[in-house]
Structures are given as C-alpha cells and as structure tokens.
Image (spheres, helix red, strand yellow):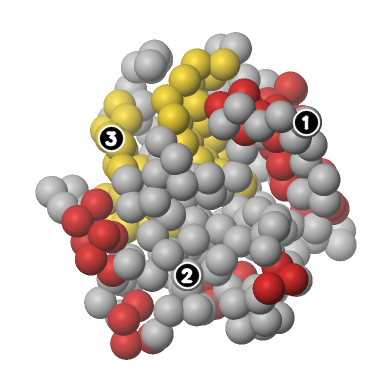
Amino acid sequence: MASQACTGCESTKHSSLSRRRDSKVYTGGLVRFIGDIHADGAAYASAVAGVDESIQVGDLEIGIAREEDVRKWPCQPGSGHRFIRGNHDNPSVCRNHPLFIESGAEGDMFFVNGAWSIDQDDREENKDWWPDEEHSQRDLDLLFEAWSNRRPRVMISHDCPWRVSQELFQIIDYSPGPSRTARALQAMFDCHQPEVWVFGHWHKRRDQKIGATRFVCLERGGWIDIDLTVKTAP
C-alpha cells in the first residue's frame, strides 16, 4: 500500500504514516478499552466478553505469537475488536491487519502507536524486537501537528507522556532517555489536554486526573468501559 497521509496530518513528505483501512469513527457512547495481552488469548477473550467492539492498546504480540493462536483471537476480520501497536508487535504485520488502527485522528479520538523497549538488548532483531518499534521523529512531528490542529477529546496510546509516568508510577529521577515516543506524547499533552487518555505499557492499573485530563493506565489483561458521550472524571 502506498504511503498516504495520516488522518489530520498536513504533509506526507518523508513520512511512513498510512491512512487507516476499514476505519471506524467513534463519535461517542460506551467504549471498551483493553490493556496489554502479550499473546494470552484466554485473557483477550475474557476482556471482550459481552461487547461487540473494543480497542486494545498494544502489545498483543502480533508477529511474535503463533499464527494458529492469533487466528483464534477476537481481532478477526469482520469483528469490531480493533487494536493499536505496542513495542512488542511487528509493525509491518500490524499494518497489514484490517483491524489495526494507524496513528492519527478518528473523529474525537486520536491514536499513537509504538513505544521504546528498555529490554531491546536482550531481544532478537526482527524476531521479537523491531528497529521501527517507535515512529520516526518526522512522523511524530506530523502527529503533533495533527494533534495541535484537531485538539481531540480522547487520546489512545501504548505509552504515555514521560512526566505523567513519573507521577503515576512514582519514578524518581526518571527521564524519557532514548524514548522519542514518550517525549512526543509529553509535547502533545503540553499543547492540548484531552478529556481522557488511555494507555497500557506499564502493566499497572491507574486512574487519575492530571491537569484537565483523566489518565487511565490499564494493567496486563485488564479492561475498562468509558462513556465518551459526556465529560469523564475519576
């Protein structure tokens, strides 16, 4: 598929962002969000029980898990169970999946894929770690531009702004280090504070308001239903 603009991005020069296929615009109502799954199909099935649509926040382990197992997961073509990409998902396999949500805007929601792997030195390149686990700086700049122009109500990302992680997880002397994703997300938050920000990556449940934003971190295998028709509060 030829590279095209992400939704809401103004320029595609030197960008790898692609327009979503089968995009579904969420305009409000109750939405189920699901935390990191890490190839646990039973946990995924349990998390979607009772709903026809969901958004999983990355680290399904697409491209790592066995294909025969993936074919049994809820995120099958034709279903309403969509997902973004974490740092433990194969970017190219995700981009070819019809239920993958590419980074960018959908209605009042905004999505940012990827994260930096702190354990990448212990992983094997193109087997369980990928050099493009994070967006390029160019793509992150385009996403920031789209974010600042659109000012969405809801952000869905795998990681979170680095100062937010410092506050939520009581990290002393933490800095984003090499994580350009955490830095970009912080810049987005500094520019515009959405009503709700849902993410995973940290494997701990948190639900706290920082500034004007309700931050919800989902634990591994956890889920939450959030009504996006009204302003939310913890």
Residue 61, label in figure: 2
Does 206 sit left or right of 230 as displayed?
Answer: right
Amino acid found under the numbered disc labelled 3? Asp
Three-letter amino acid code at the position of disc 2: Glu
Cα–Cα gap, marks 1 and 2 = 30 Å
Look at label 1 and name its amino acid: Asp
Front tag of 1 and 3: 1
Q: Position of residue 51 (x, y in %)?
A: 18, 48
Q: Residue at x 30, y 37 (%)?
A: 224
Q: Which residue is mark 3?
A: 225
Element under disc 3? strand
Give the spatial CA distance, label 3 vs label 2: 23 Å
Along the line of sight, which residue is nearer the eye, 87 or 194?
Answer: 87
* Label 1 neighbour load within 10 Å: few <14, some 14-19, many 20+: few
User: Which label's residue is closer to the chain start, 3 or 2?
Assistant: 2
- Give the x, y percent position of residue 214: 48, 21
| Residue drawn 36% across the image and 26% down it | 228
